[in-house]
Amino acid sequence: MKKEHLLKKLEGVHTLQSVMSLLHVDKQKAIYYIHRLRKEGYVKTARATNNMRIYSISFENKLGGTSYEELLNAVSPVKLSTGTVHRVYGKVPTAEEMLVHAVKTKSLRTILAALALFKEEIDWDALYRLAKANHCERQIGALYDLARKIMRTRRMGTRFRHLAIPKSQHAFGYTIPGLKSKDFQDIENLWRVHLPFNKTDLEAYA
């Protein structure tokens, strides 16, 4: 298989099993193809919490830089194994930027993975400014309160909560259009924004 065709087929974030499935090859052949692309600088490798290898494969890897997906995979038990890679050059995205990026993707799995960021050190004033500029401060607030129910988190800045929490007359919004929670309506009512998760969706954090 030509390198250009192989790179096009495998661009994204994969496990060994997803490479085997996508190329319809056995384990030995999949390892060979990954090794071939790695030698030319197209592959970055990370390990999941279960020690499984995660491969980020793209032409941009040869140019350097990092991606939101790679950074989330490093901190979250929810691994992003497929889909579009959003690469950043010249800097490493902050936790604040990664949270807002995750909400803006409107991807269920990306937002789920990003809940782990609330365990990290966060500049809440910077997060508020960034979330406000992207019109997602209520979504961030609701996701934080959701994260508190399933893991130990850093304390939210009081200024963020004071500024971001809506008045009762505010209309309801969505985190992902059309998706509502059956299990976390208390959080939804407080922030007047619908969450896309129910308890069963959060089992990776158990």
Image (spheres, rainbow, N blue to C red):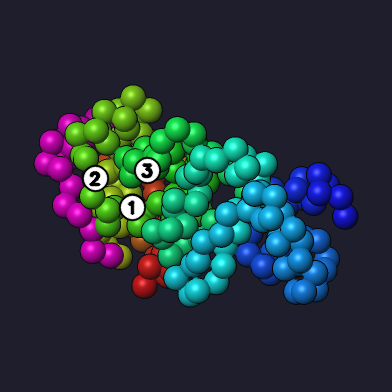
Q: Earlier in the sequence, mark 3 or mark 1?
A: 3
Q: Which residue is mark 1?
A: 117
Q: Tell me how far mark 2 sits from mark 1, CA to CA.
A: 8 Å
Task: Answer whether residue 100 is magenta in the image.
Answer: no
Disc 3 to disc 1: CB gap under 8 Å:
yes
Report which quarter residue 80 is drawn in: bottom right
Q: Earlier in the sequence, mark 2 or mark 1?
A: 1
Disc 2 to disc 3: CB gap under 8 Å:
yes
Residues in magenta, as a range? 151-171
The image's mark for residue 99 is 3
Q: Which residue is mark 2?
A: 122
Going by the numbered disc 2, the residue's amino acid type is: Ile
Report which quarter residue 91 is drawn in: top left
- Packing grade of label 3 (10 A; few <14, some 14-19, many >=20) is many
In the picture, measured across the screen, residue 177 lies left or right of residue 146, that is right
Question: What SS does tag 1 mark?
Answer: helix
Q: Main secondary structure of the magenta part?
A: loop
Disc 2 to disc 1: CB gap under 8 Å:
yes
Q: Residue furthest right?
A: 1
